[in-house]
Image (cartoon, rainbow, N blue to C red):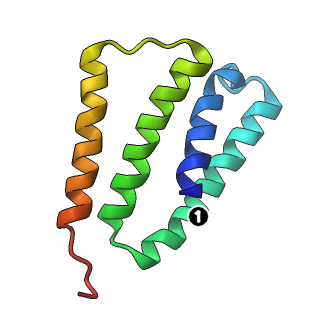
Amino acid sequence: MAATLLDVASTLMLPLTDSFFKRVPSVVLAGFYLGSFYLLSFAVQMLPLSVVYSAWSGIGVLLVAVMSYAIYGDVLRWPAMMGLFFIIFGVVLVNMYTVSQNQ
């Protein structure tokens, strides 16, 4: 979960970097992304990659969409919101039907 939160935080920082011309936000963003992948590397040692990645990216997309609305005022129309629910549904399906190599 921490890997997802770092990924979301770094993605939300993208507008603050001014296309990477602002040094401090750019360095913080890079640190958050590195931290996210570092923590993700531990998760894939315990769970199948498909489960880890689908949860990390799916939850990340949902959180970025919600937080972008709250922070930046981004508007999501109903087809986009429906797409977010499909992403959640897909993550649930992947988690339900993925079998670990250890089983």
The x and y percentages for residue 58 are: 37, 45
Residue lying farthest to the bottom in this orientation:
102
**Relative to residue 75, is residue 48 depicted above or below?**
below
The total of numbered circles placed on residues is 1
The x and y percentages for residue 41 are: 52, 68
Residue at 27 percent across and 34 percent down: it is 85
Residue 18 relative to residue 87: left or right: right
Query: Which class describes the residues within 10 Å of circle 1: few (<14), some (14-19), or many (20+)?
Result: some
Residue 13 relative to residue 55: left or right: right
Residue at 22 percent across and 36 percent down: it is 86
Instruction: Locate residue 87: give its quadrant.
Output: top left
Residue at 56 percent across and 40 percent down: it is 8
The x and y percentages for residue 84 are: 31, 32
Q: Which residue is mark 1?
A: 39
Residue lying farthest to the right in this orientation:
24
Query: Is 43 in front, or is 81?
Result: 81
Residue 45 relative to residue 27: left or right: left
**Relative to residue 90, is residue 49 depicted above or below?**
below
Residue 7 relative to residue 22: left or right: left
The quadrant of the picture occupied by the C terminus is bottom left
Query: Is 69 in front, or is 42?
Result: 69
**Relative to residue 102, is residue 45 depicted above or below?**
above
**Relative to residue 13, is residue 40 depicted above or below?**
below
The x and y percentages for residue 75 are: 44, 11
Q: Amino acid at mark 1?
A: Leu
Q: Kindly state the secondary structure of the residue where label 1 is placed.
A: helix
